[in-house]
Amino acid sequence: MSLDEKLDSVLDRYRELRDRLSGQEALDPGQLARMSKELSDLTPIAEKIDEIHKVRAELQELSDLAKDPDGDAEMRSLAEEEIEALERRLPELEREIRVLLIPQDEADARNAILEVRAGTGGEEAALFASDLFRMYQRYAELRGWKFEVLSISETDLGGYKEAIASISGRNVFARLKFESGGHRVQRVPQTEGGGRIHTSAATVAVLPEAEEVDVQIEDKDLRIDVFRSSGPGGQSVNTTDSAVRITHLPTGIVVSQQDEKSQHKNKAKALRVLRARLYDAERAAADAARAASRRSQIGSGDRSERVRTYNFPQGRVTDHRINLTLYKLDRVLSGEALDEIVEALIAEDQAEKIASMQ
């Protein structure tokens, strides 16, 4: 289907929805909600199509004026200048409309569960995991998102074996979903006396936060164990059995939560994380079924895939999926320059999807 055919199809559907919603047709609440949302989604596309049609019509009028041998010479010259400007604008509009036509990931507008875990590298990997977790916390603050720590498992030196947070705000998952994968650090560890550069790793998982209606969890599918919370090195920090471990029996997924003093609150937090992991697994299975033979340019998002390297001696950050290197390590880790990487990843993803639509 050509671009113009796609635009005509979108306009036909937009007009149909507009007419049905403004007419006398009786719609049940579910139909009304679905159609209203679809119309809302199509409105910016319809407006962009209208802009393209106006530019094309204006180009035709100016072209006729410029070619008129009986016309005023000055007017023909002005028309040619305007034609040049509109001919530059038209491809931009067409690219913008192609971006709008990309099927939207329904999870993009959702909040996210962030999970950061230390990988290979012992204590240094745990310290790197804590650096990454704080980077996302600062980034969330800069974007005006709410960052709620759900659980942190610390080491004796203040590193994080595992840290989980909920991030809430506008389009959180859309901007953070490409962060999933293996992150590598190259630096002289605080624990290294010889000044040698070590390579350590941490994994990041960004999961769209699921609602109860997305994932049905049956009580019979859960095994819930309670135990006493402990701090770094096994030090007891709670004298009551308030920590909770939930095992989802059908999948074997295990979630532990011990940050709260209340067993009820720990259970509620653990269920949020479990629900997000189950929803993510369902999405991954659906994606695999839809695109078994096709792999996105910016990577599969697989947790084992190395996506980025943070090199301290050179002060650089390299995203391996798009071959982007920034010599702004400090500003990336402070969250300030992370957007430069995020925007580049989103642009690459859009370009790949537009190419697949041709």
Image (tube, helix red, strand yellow):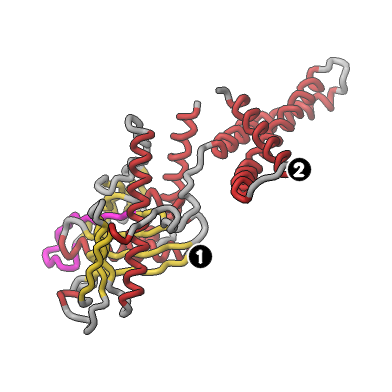
Q: Describe residue 346's horizontal placement relative to residue 72 as left or right.
A: left
Write the residue at 28% across / 69% down: 257
Residue 159 in view, yes or no: no
Report the span colored magenta. Answer: 189-205
The foreground one among 134 and 325 is 134
In the current view of this chain or complex, which residue is farthest to the left?
Answer: 194
The residue carrying pointer 1 sits among few (fewer than 14), some (14 to 19) or many (20 or more) residues within 10 Å by Cα, namely few
Q: Position of residue 84 (x, y in %)?
A: 69, 29
Quadrant of the rendered image containing residue 333: bottom left
Q: Is residue 45 above or below residue 238?
A: above
Three-letter amino acid code at the position of disc 1: Gly
Residue 358 in view, yes or no: yes
Q: CA distance from mark 1 to mark 2?
A: 43 Å
The foreground one among 24 and 264 is 24
Judging from the image, what secondary structure is the residue with disc 1 in? loop
Three-letter amino acid code at the position of disc 2: Gln
Quadrant of the rendered image containing residue 213: bottom left
Q: Position of residue 111 (x, y in %)?
A: 45, 58
Residue picked out by circle 1: 144
* Residue 202 on the magenta segment: yes
Q: Earlier in the sequence, mark 1 or mark 2?
A: 2
Image quarter where the N terminus lies is: top right
Q: Position of residue 355 (x, y in %)?
A: 47, 30
Contact flag, marks 1 and 2 (Cβ < 8 Å) = no
Q: Is residue 343 above or below residue 224?
A: above
Write the residue at 75% across / 23% down: 60
Q: Position of residue 88 (x, y in %)?
A: 64, 32
